[in-house]
């Protein structure tokens, strides 16, 4: 399987008292992303509040996402667990329900050594035939993997085949491209680096932004890949303030507030996360008005 383009991240809607997943709402979020011309759906990422779901909720969201997309585009399932055993369980389940790939993060309480991280990925790979996207997200997961180490895993772990780089350091992406001679697909996970990352050879951009701004990310990707660099620059700077805002305000809270502003109330983020305050909501509304 080959992934490229915009990988859209749905939020996870909750019911009114925030104690259960709103499956009908999830269908609407996925439809919004598909309407924004995303090239793949990645359920259960950070924007999807995967860390705050029970196991039964996680499985419910994963299964329904695959079912609702129905093969229209590839579906990637995020797996970020403290224990290797639980990561294996989720990876196996992703395969059983028909997902196309998993995005695997090494989540840590204790600081993990490279030997431990390697063993984690190798164990998950041995348990499922699904392609694995190695996800480096040190701010969230507490683990920072170097380009050299991730590429070593790509070379030696059979199903590890692509990288999502979210450290915020564009030099990491340049190094991945150079060290792999452009042969290892990597994806941008930092919204505010989208233009630089795509120009550095990224195969795509993983983002929840299409939930709120339609196909503007896709237009940016198409402009870069088409060599229309002035158009790409203009499109990126149109989006920049919005992209920066949703990251600094918290993806789940910002995207859910933005969806509510646009008439789609999918509930608040799950505590301890808090919704945007009134001042933040007004600013988000202003930013959306400028774009849509």
Image (cartoon, rainbow, N blue to C red):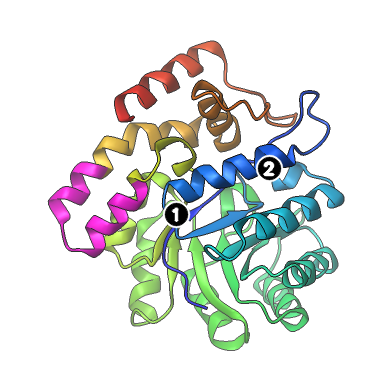
Regarding mark 1 in the picture, which secondary structure is present there? loop
| Image quadrant assignment for residue 290 | top left
Q: Earlier in the sequence, mark 1 or mark 2?
A: 1
Q: Position of residue 110 (x, y in %)?
A: 76, 56
Q: Position of residue 59 (x, y in %)?
A: 80, 55
Using the rendered image of the protein, determine whether residue 159 is visible from the camera's viewpoint.
yes
Residue 19 colored in magenta in the image: no
Q: Residue furthest top?
A: 278
Q: Position of residue 238 (x, y in %)?
A: 26, 36
Q: Main secondary structure of the magenta part?
A: helix
Residue 229 colored in magenta in the image: yes
To which residue does mark 2 refer? 49
Image-based side of 121 in relation to 21, left or right? left
**With respect to residue 80, does 154 lie above or below?**
below
Measured Cα–Cα span from mark 1 to mark 2? 20 Å
Give the residue at x 55% y 46%: 31
Q: Nearer the viewer, residue 254 or 39?
A: 39
Mark 1 crowd level (few <14, some 14–19, many ≥20, 10 Å Cα): many
Regarding mark 2 in the picture, which secondary structure is present there? loop
Q: Nearer the viewer, residue 3 or 194?
A: 3
To which residue does mark 1 refer? 38
């Amino acid at each position: 399987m080959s992934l490229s383009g915009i990988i859209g991240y749905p939020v996870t809607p909750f019911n009114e008292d925030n104690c259960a997943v709103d499956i009908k709402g999830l269908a609407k979020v996925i439809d919004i992303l598909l309407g924004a011309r995303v090239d793949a759906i990645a359920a259960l990422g950070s924007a999807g509040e995967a860390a705050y779901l029970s196991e039964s909720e996680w499985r419910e969201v994963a299964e329904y996402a695959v079912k609702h997309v129905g093969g229209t585009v590839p579906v990637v399932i995020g797996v970020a667990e403290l224990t290797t055993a639980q990561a294996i369980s989720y990876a196996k389940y992703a395969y059983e329900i028909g997902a196309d790939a998993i995005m695997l993060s090494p989540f840590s309480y204790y600081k993990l050594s490279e030997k431990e991280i390697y063993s984690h990925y190798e164990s998950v790979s041995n348990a499922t035939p699904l392609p694995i996207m190695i996800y480096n997200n040190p701010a969230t997961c507490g683990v920072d993997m170097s380009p050299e180490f991730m590429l070593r895993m790509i070379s030696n772990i059979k199903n590890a085949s692509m990288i999502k780089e979210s450290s915020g350091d564009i030099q990491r992406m340049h190094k991945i491209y150079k060290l792999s001679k452009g042969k290892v697909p990597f994806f941008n996970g930092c919204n505010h680096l989208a233009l630089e990352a795509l120009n550095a050879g990224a195969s795509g951009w993983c983002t929840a932004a299409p939930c709120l701004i339609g196909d503007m990310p896709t237009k940016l990707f198409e402009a870069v890949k088409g060599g229309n660099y002035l158009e790409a620059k203009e499109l990126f700077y149109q989006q920049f303030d919005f992209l920066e805002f949703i990251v600094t305000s918290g993806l789940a809270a910002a995207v859910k507030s933005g969806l509510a502003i646009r008439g789609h109330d999918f509930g608040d983020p799950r505590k301890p996360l808090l919704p945007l305050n009134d001042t933040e909501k007004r600013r988000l509304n202003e930013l959306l008005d400028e774009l849509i």
